[in-house]
Amino acid sequence: MSVSSRTVAGPTSQVVIALTFVPVVLEGYDLVMYGTVVPSLIRDPEWRLTAAQAGHIGSLAVLGMLFGALAAALLSHRVGRRTLVTSSVALFSVSMGLCATAATQDQLGLYRFLVGVGAGCLMPTAAAMVIDHSPAHRRGLNGAIGLAGVAVGGCLAGLLGSWIVPSHGFRPMFVIGAVAGLVVLPVLWWYLPRSAPRLDLAEADSPPTATLASLARSLFGRRYLAATLLFCASVFFCLLIIVGAAAFLPILMIKAGYGLSSSLAFLLVLNIGAGVGALIACPIADQIGFKPVTVTAFLAAAGSFSLLALQPPTAVVVVLVAIAGLGTTGTQILINIYIGDHYPQELRTAALGVALSVGRVGGILGPTYGAMLATDFDVSWQFIAFALPAVLGAAVTGLVPRSERSPQQLIEHREALQP
């Protein structure tokens, strides 16, 4: 009897997917929520931030995500994924509460950095945990369900932001995120599994006791070097668009002639498109592979931003923003699952952590990139400028080499896809 290529999904798989969904919702809320409060920070007479200063604060949060993702890569095999998930939620929840109390620009920047550390550690760990508990032929679907929490959180931020920010300013948005995180924290600690499910031998490329040095040699050795570097570049371009658009899409829409409430509502549309798009795209990727679907999603983002530059009618704008959601946050969901599927279980969190930490440099540049566009370019060129990194993301993703599977693994994977 042959050894299966699939990670065994134990009886806790549905619980794991549901429980990882919740903290990912909080991360998605935080990512988009900052974009909803930027107009308030710029207009508030007590703060009087420029677009460049608001972009700098946004970049500090993503800088924190870089360190958080790197921490996930270095610590996952030492402290376990449950500890990393719960510690991440605790850190960014407390830090969001501190953001609500910030009295100066420097304080807000520091607290946003700490929020970023927690959020950055969460995503690679949560993604790896979902994939660990999913059979190979359902990794796309299960991953989309678990990681679609990013889009759901973004939708909540867009809804609450359009309702709360115009009347009450930015502070209540941080309080909501902090309270929600602290409420779910004990549930996560109690119910998340302490360890990964049994790893089948056909997929074990590195021993469970792998050291940091052996992990580095595996990720940057001959077998995985090209994939690791290309995944880092893919995440770089995707996060450049996501964070830049999340921070400055409302500003761009205001410059295009929409009011504050309408412009914040486009963040809701963006994240609905991301969530629905990922739930459609990821099962397709299970069938035909993650590379072609991810490349197509990148190109969808490029096309939608290019058409937005033409300033079409409002109904068309809504559709294009939804497609941009698939091509941005939806694409990042695809990339995360693609990385997790490409590497064996013992390298999964490390690979995701490295790609997300290096790729976060794009996220750090995103708000500054958006601020530069908002200051120095007209609306049409601003949208074109967001389309360019999407084209580059499609190009580098298309170069990722095929995952090395044994002939027996390929046969069993095809059999798993058959009804």
Image (cartoon, rainbow, N blue to C red):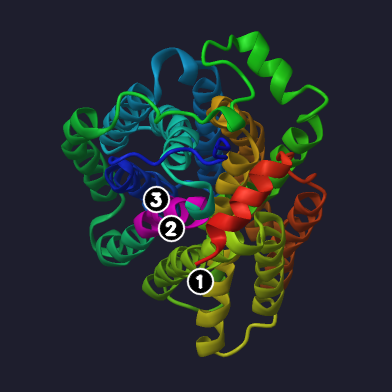
Residue 269, above or below 105: below
Q: Nearer the viewer, residue 303 or 84?
A: 84
Cβ–Cβ below 8 Å for labels 1 and 2? yes
Q: Check disc 3 and give the amino acid type.
A: Gly
Mark 2 or mark 3, whichever is nearer to me: 3
Question: Is residue 142 within the magenta segment?
Answer: yes
The answer to whether residue 78 is seen in the rendering is yes
**Residue 244 visible:** no
Residue to which mark 1 is pinned: 254
Residue 360 placement (x, y as % from top left): 61, 37
Q: Which mark is residue 146?
A: 3
Q: Distance from label 1 to label 2 (Cα)?
A: 10 Å
Q: Earlier in the sequence, mark 1 or mark 2?
A: 2
Residues 48 and 37: in front is 37
- Element type at mark 3: helix
Question: Residue at point 37% right, 45% down?
Answer: 24
Mark found first going from the N terminus, 2 or 3: 2
